[in-house]
Structures are given as C-alpha cells and as structure tokens.
Image (cartoon, rainbow, N blue to C red):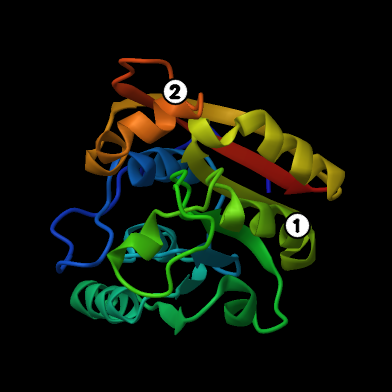
Amino acid sequence: MPATAAVTTRKPPTALFAPPGVYRPQGDTRLLAEALGREELGPGTDVMDIGTGTGALALLAAARGARVTAVDVSWPAVVTARLNALRRRVPLTVVHGDFEAGARGRSFDLILANPPYVPSPDAGLPTHGAQRAWEGGLAGREVIDRICARAPALLRPGGVLLMVHSGLCGAATTVEHLERAGLSAEVTLRASVPWGPVLRSRRSWLEAHGLVPEGETQEELVIVRAESR
C-alpha cells in the first residue's frame, strides 16, 4: 500500500463528543491524520486503530471506505468512539481491551497507533484513569516496544504501520526495533508542539534524567512509517 500525494482528508473530524477522561484530539492526532491522508484507502482495506480515544482517526479511515476496528483499553473511550460513529453514521467496530486481544488473530492492511508515550517516574503502567492514554513507563516505550514486536504478525504483506510518538522516546530506536522485527521503517513526518500540562508537571524529573535540556518548551512529535516486506 504505497504512500500517495493525492489527499482528500488530513484533519481529524471536528465537533467530536469528547467527555472528561477521554483523550481529545491534539497535535499527535493531527500529525497522524496527515500521515493517514497520504495512504491509499478504500473498500476492502482493513484498518486497526490502536488507542482510538474519541475515534477521530478511525472515523477518518472509515469515511474513506475502509473497514475499521478501533481498540482502546479505556471503557469511556470505547463508549465515546461508538457514540461518535453513531452520530456521524459511519460504520465502525470498537473493541475494548489490549490491541493484541482486539486483533483476535486477524491481520490488517493498515495499523494506526497513538500509544501512551510520555516518560514517567513510575516504571509500571496505570491500570485505570485518564492517564492510561499518555503514561508510557520510565522511557515512555512500554507500549511502543510491544507494538514494534507484534506489528509483523498483525500486518498483511505490503501492510503499513503508522505510529506517532514523542521524540523523547527515541525515533531511531523505534525504527531500529521495527527493522529488527523484519519491517522496513523510517520517520516520515515531524512536528514541534508546545509542552502540554503533563510534561510541564514533571519538568524537574525530565531534566534531572537528561531527557530534555534545561528550559525546553517544545516537544517534537514523529511519525514512524513501517511496511511489511
């Protein structure tokens, strides 16, 4: 499924229902939407959206004719994505749980992933609450690395993974892990966004661990595109 310059939709849908506790479309969502707009989609394309949140990206793909399975570990997010699909009258399958369980032995032409990726002082991942959408463990890579390891089994031949995460997590590390798993991978998009409240709240910890330079106020976001050979 090659990238294409013919793009009809690049932005997440506006006016989505987004209750408190559900991750709202932000800079990472918009960057992933831009990457999605460069891919060929249509009837017969099977897509999985990992960490769907409000369902913004899943709805973009479904509106272009793809068959989309959206997955989230948060029940509020699952309910929200289902409501947004109903409101927009777009067919969407929304599954509660981990992305591996959500795949249910299937494979896909395209996988979208906006995993939790913020480095955290806590080694473990939270088991409840809104923070499940962003807390990624000490290096921010707990879920990223699992996706890298499992992507080859989830992608069909020629299938594509589009994953967004912070530059704090190491884009080169993600590319290396994906290539080691047997995919061809590269960073295709980058964007700089102001720090949000989560990063601002742990500035001292990030600086003390050498994850950011002192006084940093901008976060780099990256899109890693991997393709099954």
Give the label on residue 225, or none.
none
Near mark 2 (Cα within 10 A), the count class, few <14, some 14-19 or many ≥20, is some
Q: Residue at x 29, y 50 (%)?
A: 12
On the image, the x and y values in percent for residue 128 come to 36, 75
Left or right side of 21 for 204: right
Left or right side of 174 for 34: left
Helix, strand or loop at mark 1: helix
Q: Amino acid at mark 2?
A: Val
* Label pair 2/1, CB-CB below 8 angstroms: no
Q: Residue at x 44, y 75 (%)?
A: 73
Left or right side of 34 for 82: left
Alpha carbon distance from label 2 to label 1? 27 Å
Near mark 1 (Cα within 10 A), the count class, few <14, some 14-19 or many ≥20, is some
Give the label on residue 149, or none.
1
- Residue labelled with disc 2: 212
Q: Is residue 2 visible?
A: no
